[in-house]
Image (tube, helix red, strand yellow):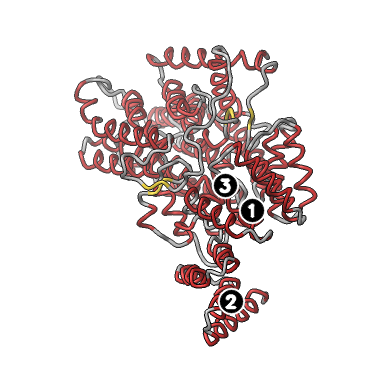
Amino acid sequence: MPNPSKSDRRKASGSRSRSAPKGMDAERTRPGSSPARVAILPVFGLALVVLAITIAAYAGVPRHEFVSWDDLDYVVENSLVLHHDYGTLLRAVISNNYHPLTMLSLAVNAGSPLSPKPFLVTNLALHAINTGLVFWLIFLLSKRRLFPAFWGALFFGIHPMHVESVAWISERKDVLYSAFFLGAAITYWQYLTTRKRLWLGITLALFVLSCLAKGMAVVFPVIMVLMDLWYRRRSPLGTSSLLEKAPFFAVALLFGLVAVNVQGIGDFHGLLIRTDYHLKGLADQLPLTPIERVVLPAYGFMSYLWRLFLPLGLSAFYPYPSAAEAGNIRYLAGPICLLAAAALAVWDVRRTRIITFGLGWFVVTIAPVLQWIPVGEAMVADRYAYLSYVGPLFALAMGISELTRGKRSLLVASSIALGAVALVFSVWTARQAETWKNSDALWSNVIRRYPRSHLGYLARGNARGGAGRIDEAFQDLQTARRLGSKKGDLYNGLGNAFGSRGDLDSAIVMYNTGLALEPNMGRTYFNRAIAYLRLSRPSEALADLQQARALSPVLTLNFHIPTANAYLQLKRFREAVAECDSAIAEGQRDPNIYYSRALGKYSLGDSTGAAEDLREARRLSGARRQP
C-alpha cells in the first residue's frame, strides 16, 4: 500500500480536528482517566472565573443584618451559641432539628460584640466552595468536559433561587450539608472509576458529616444508585452493589429515625438534649381535600422546575392557595408536569441517560420537602431547590454540550446566549439578596407578593416593634388580626406594643390571649413577667420567669436582671445577689446587673461591696455610651 502524501495527512489531521474540537467542549472518553491528562490551566482558570462571578453577585450580603426569622433562636438569643458551649451543642436539639455541625459552625462565628458579618461571610464562603464542588462534580460526570462544568457551576452559583440559602444566617445548614453531600458524590465517583475501597470509606465519612449538618442528606444512598446508573455500572441494583451501600442505608435510617423523633418533641431515648420545649412537635396540618394533597405537592414540583428557568416572584414565604384558588388550572397542571417528567426520565434510560440522571437527582433531593403530608403554612421554599438544582443544571449543560459537539458556530452562539442569561441572573441575584438585608425589607417583600396573607404583616409588625417603631408595628399587627391570624406571636407582639406605650393592663390581656392559644411560648411568659414587674407584682413575675426558663432554656432572654429585680421587690436580697452573681459568672457585663447587685448588697449591710458594684456599673454605662 503506498504511503499517504503530506497533503493527505494534513487533510486527515484537519478532519480529526474539526470532528473533535478542543477547548470548553473537549472530552476524555474513559470515566476514570487521570485529571493530569487534561490541561490544568483551563480547568482552574474557568473555575476561578465561576467563583469570581458568584462572589460578585453576592457582594452586598456581608453587610446585611440578622433577620427576625429563626436568627433569634439560632444565634441572637441562643446562649449555647453565644457562650460557645460546644459540648452541649453536640447533643442539642434546636428548633426541632438535630444538626450539631451546623450549630457548632454558628458558635464559631459568634463573637463579642455579636455581629452578623462573620456568619454571612461564612455562608458566602461555603456557597463558593459548593459552586467549586459542582464544577468538579460535573467535570467528572461529563468525562472531563469543560463546557458543561463551567456553565452548570456558573448557574448554580448565581441562580436567584439560591439567595435564601446564602443570605439567611439560619440557613447555614443548607450550604454546610450540601458541601459534604457534594464532596461525597465526588469521592463516590472516584470509587466507581478506581474501585479503591478507600474512596468508599471517605464517601461514608462525608455522608455522616452531611447528615450531622442537616437531616435532608439521608437521600444520598439513592443518589449513589443513580450515579451507578449514569456510570452504566453492571447491575446497579445487584446484590454486590447493594451490599456495599448497606452502611449508607443504615446511617440514613438512623438519622431518619432521629429526625422523626425530635420533630415529635422527643430526645431520642435520652441521648439528645431538648432546648426548645416552647415549640410544637409537628406543625398543624392543613384542612386539605384528598385531591389537594396530591395536586398541591405536584404543583410545588412544577414550580421548582419552572423557576429554574424563570425565577419570578421570589419570596421568603409562599402561602397555600385558598380553597377557591386551588381549583385553578395552573395548580391542576402540577400532576401532569410530574407524570411527564417521570415518563421522560424513563424514556431516556435506554438512551443518553442525561435526562434520567438530571431529573432523578432533582426528584430524589426535592421529594422529601414536597409537602405530601402538608404541615405549616408554606407550600414551597426557595432553599429547598439549593442542592436539587444540581441535577437539572447538569442535564441542561450536558444537553447543550452534546448538541454543539463538532459545531463550532453553534458552540459559540450557545455560549453567547448562555452568557447573556448569566448576566441577567447575576443582576437578579444581587437584587434578590437585597430583600434579605434586614427584617423590614424581607417581610415587606412578602407583603408585596402576598398582600392577603397574615404572616408577612405579623412578622413585619413584630420586627418593627422590636426596632421601636411602635405605631407602624400596631398597624401591621392589627392588619394581621383582620386577615384572620390566630398566632400566639400576634398577641405577644400586641402585648409588647401596648407595653411600650405604657398600657400595661392591656399588654397583660394580650399576653394572656397569646398563651391561651399557644401555652408553650417562653418569650411571652418572659414579656408578661416584665409587665408584672412594672406593675409591682413580683410574685407573678417570678412565676412567669421560671416558666420561661423551663420552656426556652437556651434563649438568652436576660433572665437574670428581671429575676433579680423580682427578688428585690420581694425583699429577698440574698437571692437577688446570688442571681446577679450567676449572671456575672456567665460573662454578662450589663451595668444593670451591677446596679441590682449593689441594691441587694446595700440592703444586706454590705456598703463596701455595694459601692464597688456602683462604680463598675457607672464604668460599664460610660463604655456603652462611647462610639
Give amino acid for label 1. Answer: Gly
Instruction: Look at the numbered disc 3 and give the secondary structure of its residue.
Output: loop
Disc 2 from disc 1: Cα separation: 47 Å
**Lower sequence index among marks 2 and 1:** 1
- Front-most of residues 313 and 601: 601
**Lower sequence index among marks 1 and 3:** 1
The x and y percentages for residue 485 are: 68, 33
Q: Which residue is mark 2?
A: 599
Give the residue drawn at x 34%, y 43%.
Answer: 35
Mark 1 crowd level (few <14, some 14–19, many ≥20, 10 Å Cα): some
Give amino acid for label 2. Answer: Leu
Give the residue drawn at x 52%, y 32%.
Answer: 283
Q: Nearer the viewer, mark 2 or mark 1?
A: 2
**Lower sequence index among marks 2 and 3:** 3
**Position of the N terminus by quadrant:** top left
The x and y percentages for residue 123 are: 51, 50
Q: Which residue is mark 3?
A: 168
- Front-most of residues 557 and 531: 531
Disc 2 from disc 3: Cα separation: 42 Å
Q: Which residue is mark 1?
A: 60
Quick check: 238 left or right of 144? left
